[in-house]
Image (cartoon, rainbow, N blue to C red):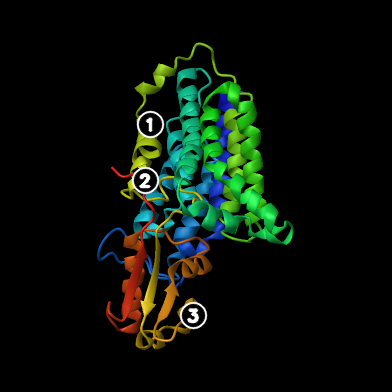
Amino acid sequence: MRLTHRLHFIKLSVLLGLLTSVLLSYNLWSGDRYFPKASILSNYHAIIPPFDYMYLVIMVLLIIISAISRSKIPLLLIILFSVFLCMDDQNRMQPWFYNYNLILFILLFYKERVDEPNNYTSIFITIQLIVAFVYIYSGLQKFNSQFIDVSLKYIFSPFEQIFSERQLNLIFKLGRSIPYLEILIGFGLLFKPARYLAIPSIITMHVLILILLGPFGNNYNQVIWPWNITMIILNVLLFANVKRDTFFDISLLFKYIYFYIVVLLMLVLPFFSFNNKYDSYLSSSLYSGNTSGGVLVLTDKAYQKLPYYIKYFTTKAPNYNVLSIKNWAITELNVPCVPEYRIFEVVQQEIITLTHTNKKEVQLVFTEREKIFNF
């Protein structure tokens, strides 16, 4: 299959994955909801429900038009509209949404001409880098003390009914090699001889994730189910039996601005997440077990003034009440809350407003993620 054909199917795969995940998390994009929006702009007044359903309709229409049209305008509008949506609510900056849009952004520079191999080959290699960097950083993010005890034990919890405790302990011991394997897979994708091992390993990994987190496993975070399927498709299209034009010089990549944008967004900036100076969700921290956490501790006075629906996510204790921000977000929005302090502060302020109390009555308990490097 020619690179031009592969780029066409990459575009369609990303658009279909984006459409599916957006529809699965429709309450994140529009509709009446309790979970507050975390707008980037201060004193910003968004369109109120139910009129904000136009956001969802516009996004769906743009995706469909982009899929059936060769024009770059619908694709550009998707990216611009996505930026607006994330400014409207930072919780929309989910890893899959970020990666999908970055790939679509790179495809804007594709001229769709078979007589310009330098153009389509450079675009193809740049998208290869995006996918490879996802696995490399996903592996690096797992070098923390919480990965085995928190993330891996939860993911493999469906196996508790199949394997003995001794067998599970062996699985967890072997799990310590996962960060190294994921990094090797990422680098393996960049070197053609290693792809014969890397591609089957990636497919196996994503299928296993789908089994463990899918409806027959933990039945958790539905929006990443289509993302895992899309990643399998992308890996096959990007790395399986690829034959580039022999005269292409890799140094040509350094002529294009989009190459530097990818290096900045996928290689340079994520490095600062290791010292908690950059968002973990924008740094391929995928089920690493190392994300910041936040809960709200409410007095009985504040708890009594909560709407009944929000009380559902609150655990009562003798002298206080704990509201789980994570459980609230994933139940109502069908995506986890972006795990950053600024987002938790917005939720705290919303509860204070709802209960007519103050920060003494509604306290934010923030747990910063573990720093992998100090610099």
Q: CA distance from mark 2 to mark 3?
A: 36 Å
Residue 197, relative to residue 47: is it above or below? above
Q: Which residue is mark 3?
A: 309
Kind of residue sitting beneath label 3: Tyr
Who comes first in sequence, dot 1 or dot 2?
A: 1
Q: Which residue is mark 1?
A: 258
Q: Furthest-right residue in view?
A: 162
Q: Furthest-top residue in view?
A: 247
Q: Of the residues tagged 2 and 3, which is closer to the observer?
A: 2
Q: Which residue is mark 2?
A: 274
Q: Are marks 1 and 2 in contact (CB under 8 Å)?
A: no
Q: Looking at this view, is 163 or 279 the one in front?
A: 163
Q: Secondary structure at mark 3?
A: helix
Q: Of the residues tagged 1 and 2, which is closer to the observer?
A: 2
Who comes first in sequence, dot 1 or dot 3?
A: 1
Q: Residues within 10 Å of mark 1 (few under 14, many from 20)?
A: many
Q: Residue at x 64, y 27 (%)?
A: 196
